[in-house]
Image (spheres, rainbow, N blue to C red):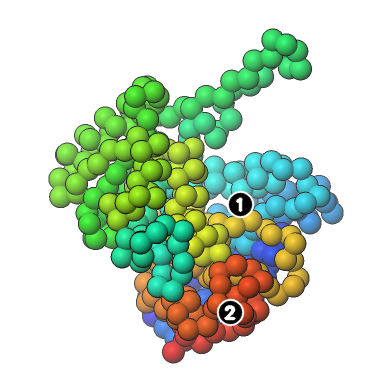
Amino acid sequence: MTGTTYKIAVLPGDGTGPEVVAEGIKVLQAAGRAENVSLDFQHYDLGGERYLRTGEILPDSVLEELKGFDAIYLGAIGHPEVKPGILEKQLLLRLRFELDQYINLRPVKLYPGVETPIKDKGPQEIDYVVVRENSGGIYTGIGGITQKDTPHEVAVQSMVYNRHQVERCLRFAFEYTKKRAKKMTLGLVGKTNVLTYVYDLWERAFQEIGERDYPEIKRDYYHVDAACMWMIKSPEWFDVLVTGNMFGDIITDIGAITQGGLGIAAGGNINPEGVSMFEPIGGSAPKYTGKNLINPLAAISAAQMMMETLEATRVAARIERGVRRVLENDIRSLASGQMGLTTSEVGDKAAAYAAA
């Protein structure tokens, strides 16, 4: 790793995205210098402002360029003057599908000093990872509307998975559980009692792959409604959870609030064989734009995930240390505007800790 150079495409995006990304880059550079790792950043002007100015969202030429990077670092997408769904579908979802980022990886980790709304639970109990399938399911938009705006209107949106999509997601989850090497337990979250076709496929593949190739990993199954309940009541049960696209979208937000909220939650859209994209989970937060008050820790944690995925593990460890020490020593609250520090001050302190 020492002496390595990583090419990172930076998409600061909308609202407070550029502010939090700037702090993430600050910490990345500090940690990289300490480990003699070079980071070559190239910024791209994609998002609501570009769309309003030019009508462009994601030019084909830019998409081709992005395929040549080691990773993509995203700030936030969402502009108050752009109708919801336009940027999300034509930028975020297009990137995920075109770059085949078929895994959404969401750590749920409560750090010391961070409050959780769950009574009598702490960092020892809240430390697991959700692996969400990111390329199929109901979000692919298969379906349609007929007889629109009439009393007989019909809307259909289908949950569609093929065996290939399911198996590659499950294999990633088994491998991640093995590499994580904590409880060595993988739980499938589904709904086999109602979604009897789709989650029958998931469960059969889960059991077959686990029994044949990963006998050392304990396998559990949870209906999604029960999983939501246990995420609140007994999060210490979990090590790694794997699920489909829609259920993953829902349960990861539950996980985020239990770890302290969107101010600390980060995620990665992963193509294990290609280009992955990392981002804070919170939105563009336009009301905080330009005020130097937004919490950048989720973006800094996304940078840590990016380095870990690129196997720059020593750089990643330094970034995580920076986040931990800011939380322990400096920040008053994760809520933007109530941190007791400005956005740039949080970045300065995290960078100093990462470099030490």
The mark found on residue 140 in the picture is none
Q: Is residue 86 left or right of residue 257?
A: right
Whole-percent x, y for residue 188 in the image: 32, 40
Above or below for 132 versus 207:
below
Q: Residue at x 40, y 36 (%)?
A: 225
Whole-percent x, y for residue 315 in the image: 42, 76
Say which of 2 and 200 sits in front: 200
Q: Circle 2 sits in a helix, a strand or a loop, which is it?
A: helix
Whole-percent x, y for residue 82 in the image: 78, 47
Residue behind mark 1:
64
Q: Are marks 2 and 1 in contact (CB under 8 Å)?
A: no
Above or below for 11 versus 312:
above
Q: Amino acid at mark 2?
A: Val
Q: Residue at x 44, y 53 (%)?
A: 255
Say which of 124 and 64 sits in front: 124
Work out how far the residue at label 2 is from the one at label 1, CA to CA, in angstroms. 35 Å
- Residue 176's image quarter? bottom left
Residue furthest toward the top?
A: 152
Q: Is residue 312 left or right of residue 218?
A: right
The mark found on residue 346 in the picture is 2
- Residue 143's image quarter? top right
Above or below for 167 versus 150:
below
Whole-percent x, y for residue 305 in the image: 45, 64
Task: Kindly tell me whether residue 350 is visible in this rendering.
Answer: no
Q: Residue at x 74, y 72 (%)?
A: 291
Task: Kindly tell me whether residue 260 is visible in this rendering.
Answer: yes
Residue furthest toward the bottom?
A: 356
Q: Circle 1 sits in a helix, a strand or a loop, which is it?
A: helix
Local crowd size for mark 2, using a 10 Å CA cut-off: few (<14), some (14–19), many (≥20): many
Q: Is residue 348 left or right of residue 161?
A: right
Looking at the rendering, in which quadrant would you find the N terminus?
Answer: bottom left
Q: Amino acid at mark 1?
A: Glu
